[in-house]
Structures are given as structure tokens and as C-alpha cells.
Image (cartoon, rainbow, N blue to C red):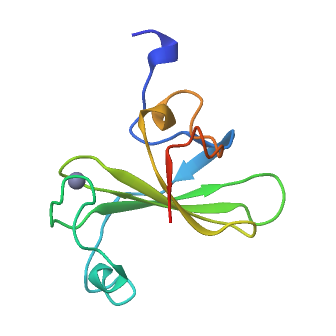
Amino acid sequence: MTLSEERFALPIAWDGHPIVWGDWESVSDLTWCGGVTAHGWRGCRHCHARALPRSILGHVDVGIGPGINLSLFRCMTCGYSTVLEMSEFTDGREWVLDSSDYGLEGSWNVELEQGELVL
Ligand SMILES: [Zn+2]
């Protein structure tokens, strides 16, 4: 594997800024703001597994302001991963990660290149 083919378990950058990830957590239906089912969780959109995803929080320091907070959710059955992006400029946009987001370049906020924007 060459360096350019290196892949990571999580995106290492967001719009070119390093992401500092926390620890993986189980998503509990009891503790997450009334439960994920209350927030529309009906199973994985990709493989339809009913098991709750795991989540991890990330923070991106963009040099000014409070930065960007990321909440990544991953289906532990198929790996389908979404990121909820929250910042003072973006009011909760959700992205579906694709293989391009796991390389050395990280994930770029170019809507044509950063997977699919889910509305
Ligand atoms: Zn899945």
C-alpha cells in the first residue's frame, strides 16, 4: 500500500483542518435526547439493520470562532457512516461519508466531492 492509498478508520481532516476525535460511544436509546428512535432512527438506511449505531464526536479548529463540531454515526453491521456537522456557519448539515473521506486528504466540504448531502 502506498502512502496515497492509506486509509483511516475515521476521516482525519475536515475541509483541510485536522479533526480531533473523542471516543466511540454506544448510542443508547434511553439517554440520547429522548432516544434515537424519537429522532427518526428506523434502522440503518443502507443495510436496514435495526441495531443502534455507534457514535463518536469530533472537533475541528478552523482558526477562528468556536470551530466545527462533528457527530459521526456508524452502522456496526455495514459501516454506513453519517456525519452531522454543526458550526456557527452551518446549522446541522448531515453528510454520508464515502471512501474518499478516509484518505490522507480527509473530508472536503465540497458538496460534489464530499459524498452525498442528506436533507
Ligand atoms: Zn448498515
Q: In screen coordinates, is 20 left or right of 102?
A: right
Q: Nearer the viewer, residue 80 or 63?
A: 80
- Give the vertical position of 11 relative to 76 (above or below): above
Query: In x, y percent, where is residue 38?
Result: 32, 86
Hey, which residue is sitting farthest top in the picture?
2
The quadrant in which the N terminus is found is top left
Nearer to the camera, 46 or 77: 46
Q: Position of residue 47 (x, y in %)?
A: 19, 53
When the figure is inspected, residue 15 is found, relative to residue 40, above or below; the finding is above
Q: Residue at x 45, y 17 (%)?
A: 5
Measured along the vertical axis of the image, is residue 76 above or below residue 15?
A: below
Q: Quadrant of residue 59?
A: bottom right
Q: Position of residue 32 (x, y in %)?
A: 36, 82
The residue depicted at 81 percent of the width and 64 percent of the height is 65
Q: How many marks?
A: 0
Residue at 25 percent across and 81 percent down: it is 29
